[in-house]
Image (cartoon, helix red, strand yellow):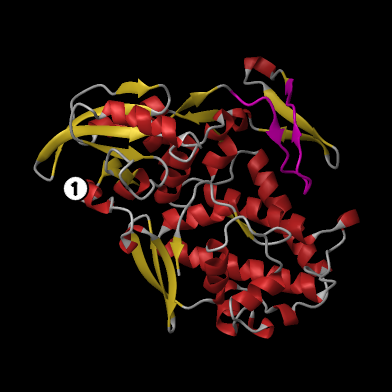
Amino acid sequence: MTLTDVLLDLLQRADARDEEASLVDQDEVAAWPSGALELVTECGLLASAAPATSVHCDACDDDHWELPIWASAENGGEPRAYIRCPTFGLQRVMPARLRRYQVSLVGLAGALARLPRTEVTPRELTQGRIWHLGQVDLQGESGALLLVRGIAWGDGADLLRQLGLAVAVGDAWALSLSPPPVRDATWPVPTMHLPAVLSLGDAGLAIRRDALRGGPAASVPAGHEDAKCIMRRSGGAWFIRYDGVEDTIPHLVGLGYLAVLLRNPMHTFRPEELVSLAGAEIAETVTGSEASAAGLRTWHEAEGPVLDEEAVKQIQQRIAVLQSKRSWGTLNSSELAELQALQRHLRSAMGLGKQPRRMTSEHGKLRASVAKAISYARNKIGEHNPVLALFLEHAVKTRGGFTYEPDRPISWLP
């Protein structure tokens, strides 16, 4: 995980309607790069929240949460916390794991107002939705800079009316927490996607003024193709445009699957349908080079159990070592990420009775292979456009069937 990943995740949480989604627990923070927590708290993006009342058990492979049991320490030391695991009994947990943080919209607005040096305290124009960040000079013109939240919440008409009232007195530019729609006659202000102009580095938050200057031009009138999102194959490469960022990525089978899904929102495909529509032969669902690079096997090679007994034993031994380090508070962020990944992998590979799950049908093999190809393609996209990769991670569902479920209407051109 990088500082960019941290920023994108927090901005997405800030745009969520559910207040619980804006909470970040200590286990998540432990996987962040060193110093990231200090950076986002110092700039005001994250604030302390009420401690958690339960803790996720990392002693076993079962996904369960338990209430902590507190025990007084001798000689007036810090109390100790334990949870009762149904499998392994009493397990000590570090009290720090109960810490929680919350994305602060007020803090974010304040940080954004400071970056262009507007020299004003942000004003909340519409509760929880629109903030006035001050006056800025862009493209030789002076206007208000606004922060907008919840464009995709379904009450667009009301938000448009409120935004129109906010900018009625003069020119303005808006920063949106979610990708803005293509501007047409009903959209009153040039709007830029905040993750596209904001960055997080070792010195803290920074805003790309060149991107701000390009903001109004990015809001192209309806009907202009370059305002759309594009995923188009040309020979051995794919041209992709999203949120104003353009990239060309060498052909991957998983990109073909994604292209089909993106052009058919809310439709659930069986793996056989997806393969057929993507124009790939079933036996070539994942090419040899892709499988090698991703550490995968093609579906027709995936015989027998997902993990053999020796592999399960080795994973369990490594998990035990990492859990021991965590109980003593000596686990670093990379080791925590490894522990969480191993636990997820083991859970997905084990069936009823804790026995290794087996690939029992051609359909199951094909479904698993298509899911892996999509995941590999999404990771490759992330190397070029992390904003799009994060969007796809949440919008493309690969459990059971395959469905693209965007949280807002997006037009993808072939």
Task: Examine the structure image and report whether residue 281 is included in the region drawn in magenta.
Answer: no
Q: In terms of image quadrants, where is residue 372?
A: bottom right
Residue lying at 70% horizontally and 53% vertically, measured from the top left? 343
**Residue located farthest toward the top when viewing the structure as drawn:** 76
Identify which residue, 292 or 332, lies in the foreground: 292
Residue lying at 71% horizontally and 67% vertically, measured from the top left? 270
Left or right position of 122 against 332? left
Identify which residue, 21 or 230, lies in the foreground: 230
Left or right position of 1 against 239? right
Label tally: 1
Q: In terms of image quadrants, where is residue 173?
A: top left
State the residue position of label 1: 213
Is the residue 43 above or below the residue 207 in the image?
Answer: above
> What amino acid is labelled 1 in the image?
Arg
Q: Residues within 10 Å of mark 1 (few under 14, many from 20)?
A: some
Left or right position of 320 against 220? right
Residue lying at 78% horizontally and 46% vertically, measured from the top left? 60
Identify which residue, 387 or 23, lies in the foreground: 387
Residue lying at 49% horizontally and 25% vertically, measured from the top left? 48
Task: Examine the structure image and report whether residue 68 is included in the region drawn in magenta.
Answer: yes
Residue 376 visible, this orientation: no
Residue 206 visible, this orientation: yes
Query: x and y percent of residue 332 in the render?
Result: 54, 47
Q: Main secondary structure of the magenta part?
A: loop
Query: x and y percent of residue 395 in the render?
Result: 56, 53
Could you say whether the residue bearing mark 1 is in a helix, strand or loop?
A: helix
**Residue located farthest toward the left when viewing the structure as drawn:** 140
Is the residue 142 above or below the residue 310 in the image?
Answer: above
Query: x and y percent of residue 227 in the render?
Result: 33, 58
Quadrant location of the C terminus? bottom left
Span colored in magenta: 51-70
Left or right position of 26 against 306? left
